[in-house]
């Protein structure tokens, strides 16, 4: 699949073949990254400028895209507080913002709290726009780096039992992970409170594509079957009230006692930030991959930038 000049708005743009070639490109990016850290600057993106427009908080995703661009020799203009300090405050539309920023930058990375918002901005942009998270809907680059981490750690994507624990209703990460993993022969165990279950449309699509799915509220009972334990945060900012959020905050806490029940070769993923869903005592467990994921995220975003900018 040729991504040159394309927006990356959704995981739906990827199939099995394009995923594997992106992962192979990310492996090459790891080499460039290593050399760059040793002082040998790559100049693949020389002369290219990336704009990052963040209407929602971010640590990893924004820094990771910006690191990716700079490790490839490109440059970055950035606004981490679009809600507070951009012309959004003067009621500029997303379409106008897209048109304007695309007159300056060669590629735009955007995060926004509303589903479909990145697509709106992209519709008016003359340059590729990369979705860095649109509300509870999608987070393609995070899911790509998650599946890349599974592929690297387990050496395969077929034949795995994937556990997803946390907020599957509002979490854009589990939604995007399912949409990528549907291309592989995986079994799914979704662990969440009844009110935060995986959306029916996602479950239906996975079943229709031949995947076995089990939904449960009990992590302790199911953890022993999982090859991948993918945890997510209860998405506080998406709840209608603090009281509603508090009902679910801390509902799952992965600690060393639970880890004793997990397979010896399982891996633990989390997009971060964590609140309390993984106890820090688990960090020393060799099955933990959530900090390694961050490094893989830079390589995946380098691969995405190289793919869209050519
Ligand atoms: C995730 C997000 O923003 O959706 N974080 C990230 O990008 N690493 C997960 C989350 O905020 O819970």
Image (cartoon, rainbow, N blue to C red):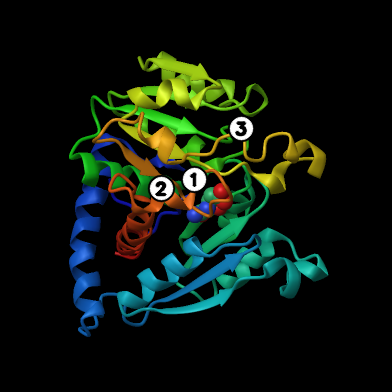
SS at mark 2? Answer: helix
**In-front residue for pair 23/39:** 39
Residue drawn at (65%, 60%), measured in percent from left and top?
Answer: 56
SS at mark 1? Answer: loop
**In-front residue for pair 231/122:** 231
The x and y percentages for residue 210 are 35, 14
Whether residue 92 is situated above or below residue 239 in the rendered picture: below
Residue wearing tag 3: 169
Cβ at disc 1 under 8 Å from ligand 1: no
218 lies left or right of 115: left
Q: Earlier in the sequence, mark 3 or mark 2?
A: 3
Whether residue 117 is situated above or below residue 164 in the rendered picture: below
Mark 1 and mark 2: Cα distance apart in space: 7 Å
Residue at the farthest front position: 257
- Badge 3: how crowded within 10 Å, few (<14), some, or many (20+)? many
213 lies left or right of 157: right
Residue drawn at (19%, 51%), measured in percent from left and top?
Answer: 24
Res. 249 mark: none
Residue 152: tell me if it is visible: yes
Residue wearing tag 2: 282
Mark 3 and mark 1: Cα distance apart in space: 19 Å
The x and y percentages for residue 298 are 35, 63
> Mark 1 touching mark 2, by CB under 8 A?
yes
């Amino acid at each position: 699949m040729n991504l040159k000049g394309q927006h990356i708005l959704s995981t739906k743009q990827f199939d099995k073949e394009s995923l594997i070639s992106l992962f192979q490109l990310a492996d090459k990016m790891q080499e460039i990254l290593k050399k760059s850290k040793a002082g040998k600057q790559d100049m693949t993106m020389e002369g290219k400028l990336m704009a990052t427009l963040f209407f929602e908080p971010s640590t990893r995703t924004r820094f990771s895209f910006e690191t990716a661009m700079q490790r490839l020799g490109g440059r970055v203009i950035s606004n981490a507080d679009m809600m507070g300090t951009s012309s959004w405050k003067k009621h500029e539309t997303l379409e106008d913002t897209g048109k304007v920023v695309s007159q300056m930058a060669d590629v735009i990375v955007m995060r926004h709290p509303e589903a479909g918002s990145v697509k709106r901005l992209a519709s008016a942009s003359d340059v590729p726009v990369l979705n860095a998270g649109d509300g509870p809907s999608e987070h393609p680059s995070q899911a790509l780096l998650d599946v890349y981490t599974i592929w690297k750690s387990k050496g395969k994507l077929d034949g795995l039992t994937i556990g997803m624990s946390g907020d599957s209703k509002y979490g854009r990460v589990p939604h995007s992970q399912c949409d990528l993993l549907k291309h592989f022969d995986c079994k799914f165990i979704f662990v969440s409170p009844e009110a935060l279950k995986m959306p029916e449309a996602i479950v239906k699509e996975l079943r229709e594509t031949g995947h076995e799915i089990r939904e449960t509220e009990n992590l302790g009972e199911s953890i022993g079957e999982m090859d991948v334990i993918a945890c997510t945060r209860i998405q506080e900012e998406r709840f209608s009230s603090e009281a509603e959020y508090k009902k679910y905050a801390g509902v799952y806490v992965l600690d060393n006692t639970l880890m004793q029940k997990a397979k010896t070769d399982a891996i633990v993923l989390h997009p971060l930030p964590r609140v309390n869903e993984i106890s820090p005592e688990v960090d020393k467990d060799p099955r933990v991959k959530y900090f390694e994921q961050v490094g893989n995220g830079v390589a995946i975003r380098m691969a995405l930038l190289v793919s869209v900018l050519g």
